[in-house]
Image: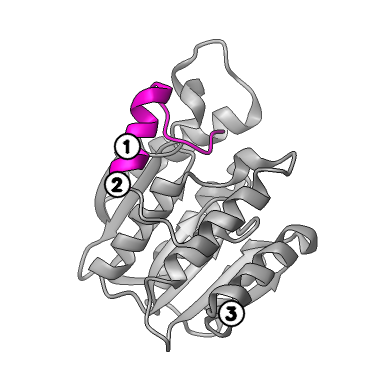
Amino acid sequence: MSNQSIGIDPPLYQYLLDVSLREDPVLAELRAVTAELPERNMQIAPEQGQFMAMLARLIAARRYIEVGTFTGYSTLAVAQAMPDDAEIIACDVSREWTDIAQRYWRQAGVADRIRLVLQPALDTLDELVGEGKTGYFDLAFIDADKTGYVDYFERCLRLVRPGGLILVDNTLWGGSVVDPEKHDEDTEAIRSFNRHVHDRAEGDLSLIPIGDGLSLLHKRAGQ
């Protein structure tokens, strides 16, 4: 895992940040706090958060669901790009990490847009499907346990509207996906997920080398 884009040397990466990153001060503070945690590499790169916020604006997203919230950086980045009446569901299982998230959501003035659900994300997604939320969300982001990616994706594919986007993090997995010596459970899960999505016909697919690899699926109208 990585919290900066892979395949770029440090001087070029710093240049990328210097000429393109426009990070809100609250986001920067949250990123600095998260950097003190042992699990800091679980946070997305700041340029990825900015890119996700741009995507949310481009599709005029008002309803967003996130699978895996950690300390809430991605949630906050997207929330700030959405209107005041936005509806965000953040799925996680850690009270410790999401307590940090909620503190910064409140500081940024977006906490009222976000409903945090602390239980296994698959349970939450299945409940939303059961509530008739099929085609309800504009945008989904998956960044949780890698072995659950296919199941999370399939649920999100039902929950996101035609014309909406599903974003999936860590799909290059630090380059391990092409390392013939890597056969651990998470690496194999990412490989299986990437093949699974590539073979689906429901949308337009792109995997871009931002952060640790971000896959985008645009759900076509009529699907």
Decide: is 41 above or below 217: above
- Label 1: element kind: helix
The amino acid pointed to by label 2 is: Ser
Count residues near mark 1 (Cα–Cα under 10 Å), then give few for <14, some for 14-19, many for 20+.
Answer: few
Which label belongs to residue 20?
A: 2
Q: Which residue is mark 3?
A: 111
Residue range of the region highlighted in magenta in the rendering? 1-20
The amino acid pointed to by label 1 is: Leu
C-alpha separation, residue under disc 2 versus residue under disc 3: 27 Å
Q: Earlier in the sequence, mark 3 or mark 1?
A: 1
**Residue 188 placement (x, y as % from top left):** 56, 29
Decide: is 23 above or below 5: below
Q: Residue at x 37, y 71 (%)?
A: 81
Task: Confirm whether the magenta stretch covers residue 8.
Answer: yes
Residue 70 quadrant = bottom right
Q: Residue at x 78, y 64 (%)?
A: 95
Q: Is residue 49 left or right of residue 44?
A: left
> Does any portion of residue 155 appear in the rendered image?
no
Count residues near mark 2 (Cα–Cα under 10 Å), then give few for <14, some for 14-19, many for 20+.
Answer: few
Count residues near mark 3 (Cα–Cα under 10 Å), then give few for <14, some for 14-19, many for 20+.
Answer: some
Q: Nearer the viewer, residue 214 or 121?
A: 214
The residue positioned farthest toward the top in the image shown: 181
**Residue 75 placement (x, y as % from top left):** 52, 65
Q: Residue at x 45, y 62 (%)?
A: 24
- Label 2: element kind: helix
**Residue 128 placement (x, y as % from top left):** 55, 77
Closer mark to the observer between disc 2 and disc 3: 2
The amino acid pointed to by label 3 is: Ala
Q: Nearer the viewer, residue 61 or 34?
A: 34
The residue positioned farthest toward the right in the image shown: 96
Q: Which residue is mark 1?
A: 16
Q: Nearer the viewer, residue 156 or 34?
A: 34
